[in-house]
Image (cartoon, helix red, strand yellow):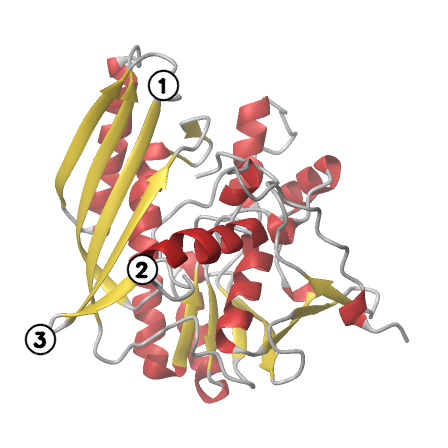
Amino acid sequence: MTDPTALSCPAPAAETERVLLGHGSGGRLMAELLHDVIAAELGADRVTEDAAVVDTGTAEVVTSTDSFVVTPRFFPGGDIGSLAVHGTVNDLAMRGARPVALTLAYIIEEGLPLAELRAVTASAARAAGLVGVPIVSGDTKVVPRGAADGLYVTTAGVGVRRLDAAPSAARGRPGDAVLLSGPIALHGTAILSARESLGFEAEIASDSRPLHALVAAMLDAGGPDVHTLRDPTRGGLASALNELAESSSVGVDIAEDAVPVPRPAAAACELLGLDPLHVANEGCLVAFVAPAAADAVLRAMRARPEGAEARAIGTLTDEHPGRVHMRTLLGGVRVVDMLVGEQLPRIC
């Protein structure tokens, strides 16, 4: 039998002295950029989290910042304003934090219609209102025509972490259940469909939504047994699982028939030659949960609308640490690697 660890294709040689589009993909090139350039110059260890915990002495404060450059700015299921709020709230939630405040900053290209700016701002305000978190500060810069692509949005968030929660990329343990909150591949295929006017027979809408209430329900059910949380955005589920496997020094075993891909998204991926595991998501999460608490956490997820289609998709193992294996529909084993290069730029 062929060794499944020998089935990965060699990565293309990368130009190392200039930034490539692939450095923004959420895959292997981005991981190298963060570790070898940004973290190295900041004197930090490897960057493995999208939000950081700051101990203030009285409470653990979680902070996160993110920039959004999605094109088109309005797409089925959302827009750049609501996406910015959801993305930052979700980064806080993945560290077990309740969001308490957001900031919002714009870089605006000269000539952007004011009606569009109003619509984006109103959408961000509605999204923040539904979450129950105020936008407390911000900034606006205007640049000449050609210096930006219409509008870029940057958000920062502050949250307070629950005392009974400590989810981290490094806390996965062999035997943990791998839980997925819902279908994958919707956001990336929705953006591509809207961008290229592909006109699929079944319209595909982004799954962009906040996940803080889902995380709260999971922590109510599992507390510290919820070891790891991650929203698989750029680079998709494959890159997220590989990052977590490396951070926790565990192997990940998943089953292909357990990973839900909606039929329209699957058809779009097949038509366009995309792997759904590499397609970005903005409204689902993957969790590593201790086996004793896994059933209770899964029930809690399914009781929430954001987790109604949650399911267990695999387990963690002490075999093949740092790697992700998938049992295919044909009964074989496939190595699931991180996204290499840029599959779809400007998705968030």
Please give the residue where the numbered disc 1 appears in the rendered image. 147
Give the mark toward the camera: 2 or 1. Answer: 1
Look at 54% across and 71% down and name the residue there. 246
Q: Position of residue 21 (x, y in %)?
A: 54, 36
- Name the amino acid type tagged 1: Ala
| Local secondary structure at mark 3 | loop
Q: Position of residue 80 (x, y in %)?
A: 36, 33
Residue 212 is at least partly visible in this image: no
Q: Earlier in the sequence, mark 3 or mark 2?
A: 2
Name above or below for residue 7 compared with residue 177.
above
The answer to which of 177 and 142 lies nearer the viewer is 142
Q: Which mark is residue 58?
A: 3
- Name the amino acid type tagged 2: Ala
Look at 74% across and 36% down and name the residue there. 271
Q: Which mark is residue 241?
A: none
Alpha carbon separation for disc pair 3 and 1: 44 Å
Label total for image: 3
